[in-house]
Image (spheres, helix red, strand yellow):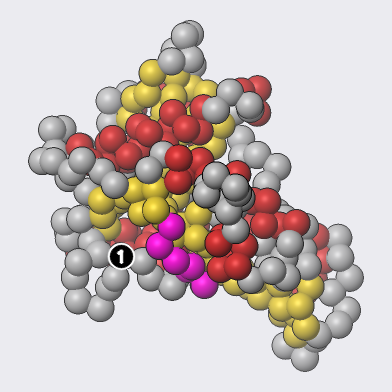
Amino acid sequence: MRTVSLADRPDLADAAFAIPYGPHGGPFMRGNQVAVLVRWRRLAQRWPGYTVVLLDERDVPVARGVMVPFAADVEDRERFPDGGWDQVVIWAAEDVLDGTPPDTACALGIVVHPDCYGQRLSRRVLASMVERAGASGLALIAPIRPPDKAAEPHTDMAEYASRTRSDGLPADRWLRVHVRAGGRIIGIARCSATVQAPLAQWREWTGLAFREDGPVAVPGGLVPALASQAQDVGVYVEPNVWVLHTTEARRPQTSGSR
């Protein structure tokens, strides 16, 4: 197997983004409005060098990893904002519009084809993302969404992320993948992904009644959603875990990344 970027192989965009998301998360995440800024066609057109595609021996995409570049070292910004995934996506879009050069790459997600689960392909994709960020002269950060946290929606994310095994590695399997790859847990992005919608939409997404005020544990949610009957609205604010990957940053060797 080998990895390429969409800057190298733009012809792979359709097949790479046809790889379906896994069962983790919930349909309510489609209500995240910031995500429209990084629809796949925009990623392929605006940031082709930051989408990594893993090809099998038949040259067929079996996994993808997506990053966006942004400028963290500018006024009124920071590398690890509380706004996490949402905030970085907005900054990346602003920087494209303003022509601001990036200094950081943010990993937005890794997706493996369901037929290839259990083959540790995500590790290969992550390693390629770290390498390519360094080749572009950028640091690599990631707002990690540990999917197993959904089994404990009422546990504080900081407590969850701090759990370790006897060997010192994170107890969570996805955080463990990143730490094994050289990542370092920095802290918690408390407001990393937000979804707000009328209660009727939440009932459709989840099959739950949403008849009372207060927290509602939703399938696939890392934390409960908050319901208000008076406002007829439900709001989900997801925390993620900030991870920093050490890259061998050097001057970019290729163009076409923006």
Image mark count: 1
Q: Residue at label 1?
A: 79
Reply above or below: 204 against 176: below
Q: Main secondary structure of the magenta part?
A: strand
**Between 176 and 70, which is closer to the camera in this rendering?**
176
Q: Is residue 64 left or right of residue 44?
A: right
Query: Where, by quadrant of the figure, is residue 149 drawn?
Result: bottom right
Q: Position of residue 119 (x, y in %)?
A: 58, 23
Q: Is residue 229 left or right of residue 75?
A: right
Q: Position of residue 152 (x, y in %)?
A: 73, 62
Name which residue lies at 44% across and 66% down. Answer: 187
The magenta segment is 185-191
In what quadrant of the picture does the C terminus appear? top left
Q: Is residue 80 magenta?
A: no
Element class at badge 1: loop
The amino acid beneath tag 1 is Arg
Q: Is residue 189 magenta?
A: yes
Name which residue lies at 60% across and 58% down. Answer: 163
Crowdedness of circle 1 by 10 Å Cα count: few (<14), some, many (20+)? many
Q: Position of residue 95 (x, y in %)?
A: 24, 61
Reply above or below: 111 against 28: above
In what quadrant of the picture does the N terminus appear? top left
Name which residue lies at 62% across and 62% down. Answer: 160
